[in-house]
Amino acid sequence: MKIVVQKYGGSSVATTDKIKEVAKKVIKKKEEGYHVVVILSAMGKTTDHLISLAKDISDNPDPREMDMLLTTGEQVSIALLSMALNEKGYLAVSFTGSQLNIQTTAMHQKARIKDIEISKLQKSLKEDKIIVVAGFQGVTEDNEYTTLGRGGSDTSAVALAAKLGASCEIYTDVDGIYTMDPRKLKNAKKINKISYEEMMEIASLGAGVIHYRAVEMAQKYEIPIYIASTFSDKKGTIIMNGGENLMEETLITGMASSLEDIQVTLLNLTSCTGSLYRLFGELAQQEANVDMISQMLTEDNKMNVSFTIPKTDLHIAEGIVDKWRKEDKSIQWEVSTDIAKISVVGIGMRSHSGVAAKVFELMAENNIEIKMVTTSEIKITWIVDVKDELKVIELIGKEFGLKEVHA
Amino acid sequence: MKIVVQKYGGSSVATTDKIKEVAKKVIKKKEEGYHVVVILSAMGKTTDHLISLAKDISDNPDPREMDMLLTTGEQVSIALLSMALNEKGYLAVSFTGSQLNIQTTAMHQKARIKDIEISKLQKSLKEDKIIVVAGFQGVTEDNEYTTLGRGGSDTSAVALAAKLGASCEIYTDVDGIYTMDPRKLKNAKKINKISYEEMMEIASLGAGVIHYRAVEMAQKYEIPIYIASTFSDKKGTIIMNGGENLMEETLITGMASSLEDIQVTLLNLTSCTGSLYRLFGELAQQEANVDMISQMLTEDNKMNVSFTIPKTDLHIAEGIVDKWRKEDKSIQWEVSTDIAKISVVGIGMRSHSGVAAKVFELMAENNIEIKMVTTSEIKITWIVDVKDELKVIELIGKEFGLKEVHA
């Protein structure tokens, strides 16, 4: 009998009525002839509520005690879903991360899964029970409760699917992954299939739907993930290994745009690798999150460097540049704040080299200045002025077929 | 270093502000030079809230899943108290029943403690940590979570104190045990010391303060229990082994009165032990909670039996009597509903035989009819008409010194 792992997020179990709906969805799968293992998040705003209790008591609560506190959230939802399944006449049993021995590292609040003991699961599956597991949590060798940090429940689901050789379904409050945020691109298309690499190259495509970390693990163990809405029957998106035949008609799978970054440019640096190492080393040390980097030599044997960082990290860059300029007054610098960072991703780019050229052509034809470009094998990212953002999105969306075509 | 176990009930940890107050109380004890082990209940109405979620889903939720649900309540409060202690600069660590291996029977919702592994506790005490333990819960051999049923947290506290050779303090929202419910006896005195046996003979003296079951365990392991208010420094009540020197000046330690019972009298039964066995056997089978029993033979070789049961069990008695009267039409029966059941308890009665006589004398002098009497070694219980209840309480209260004497 095939096993399927289904994960339901916090908004899907926010009330007892929603939990009853989830029970129906689980039972439907069971009736189709599957063994079902369900992973749940905490109900709705429960985790936020627990965090606010902790903040009432301490500005900096002990991470171990935070995990003690937060792991109760999923424990409540798994008990309630088991009851709802029982109520409908189905055998069900719930397990915490500790009970199931989801072994993790001892790093509280951001533990990593090391292994999962599946003997208990297999015993319950043999008894034909539906298994309901608390997501987001695990346990150390010393029986200390841990949580997996952001995206934890998704990671729990993928890890269990990998361990059980099961397929993995993630149910949430959106009905799949779109080519672009529909608030920015009218008629953005739902993507039927997307590769792990594409999802990871533009993590924001899955923002609020599935965590980067879970996709990474799914790729490692080659577990396809089906993402769909809990409360509708619309076809969702499948994330799986890409390949020519999967993507043959698509050059660009999706697009993202961010207004969260600034571009910093340093001119007249001493031209040596040491300068680069020193610059990005100091930024990293202060945890400034550098994304794009572009560097070039100038005629007079100097070097110009341009990079993007989140707006909130501007003060870090300022501090470093001030210090450098005290040492070398010839260094100039510029900061562009009103920029949009546009990215397109597509596994098809690997075999079609013309994508970057097409992007540049579109920009030129429409008099849009490109302030910076970086590319990877399957992704192109460029900076434009913020006033051009929506125009660029529309142009790219139309050109590469990211919009729903209505007759 | 001496160890003290302190238990705080749900009303003492109902809010984060109250938890901070509890932290101060715990720290005070620590500063007095004790190792402190704290047992907590769930915050305020948490357990009620969880039960209502379960009832939304099922009228008859699986007991195992109920325990999965309810054990989260204490887990939240222990995490928060640990944080509050950390915040004040004290090392603290919280443990669930499962982590501490509080081994119980597998009877969900009413498990009994079998043993507690204290190696983990001892390790943390050596590290000079304050230990915060989830009350009311334990774990089976198979790592299934269990709860201890009514009075569970008190029982957890006494069991841990017994296992650690510690003293036991129970903090609650009243400041001790009184000779009588102060709503019924004006100026009822607080009892400084009371024996286990007295507490158990009149369980209602401790109603809402400490559970019968915890007192029973405390007696078994000879653990004195100190009961006081969480949020005041008033001297409380100590429950301990009684003895001549403890009680020498007190004949009567406390008194209770209940209006919850009715008195059923059967006349003209066939006089044999078989009838009694059959009567009380049938009542027990239907779970009618018989309290007092009085029986006597009549001249014509018949038997009269009188007994009390809760008002809510009247229909059970009626059903049984109806059946019997079909078999033997000579059986008569009477039901008194407007009665008060008065009890006095005192370990001093053992060596002073005049207490019952004094009670009868007081009743006679004041023209109060006694409808039924039963006695044990340290307790006298009698039935009067409900209209006489408060008069009797006042008479007994004055005669036996149960009232505060103000100068």
Image: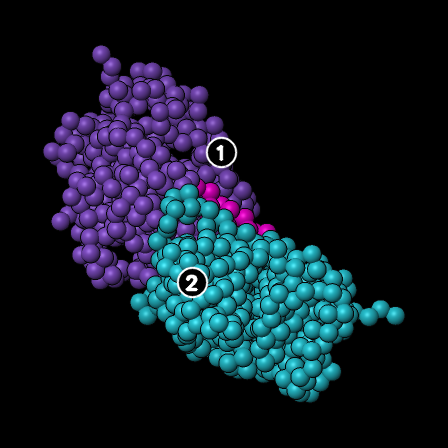
Chain colours: A cyan, B purple
- For the N terminus of chain A, the image quarter is bottom right
Whether residue B112 is visible: no
The CA span between labels 2 and 1 is: 88 Å
**Residue under the image location 41 percent in, 74 percent down:** A273
Q: Quadrant of the C terminus of chain A?
A: bottom right
Q: Position of residue B79 (x, y in %)?
A: 37, 51
Identify residue for label 1: B335
Q: In screen coordinates, is A323 left or right of A170? A: left
**Which mark is on residue A283?**
2
Judged from the image, the secondary structure of the residue bearing numbered disc 1 is: strand
User: Is residue B315 inside the magenta stretch?
Assistant: no
Query: What residue appears at the point 26 percent right and 46 percent down from the top-left corner?
Result: B89
Q: Residue at x 19, y 41 (%)?
A: B31
Magenta stretch? B43-57
Determine which quarter of the picture holds residue B232: top left
Q: Is residue B187 visible?
A: yes
**Residue A23, how many percent across, how many down?**
62, 64
Relative horizontal placement of residue B172, taking residue B238 as reference (left or right): right
Q: Amino acid at mark 2?
A: Leu
Asked if residue A173 is positioned above or below residue A54 in the image, the reply reads below
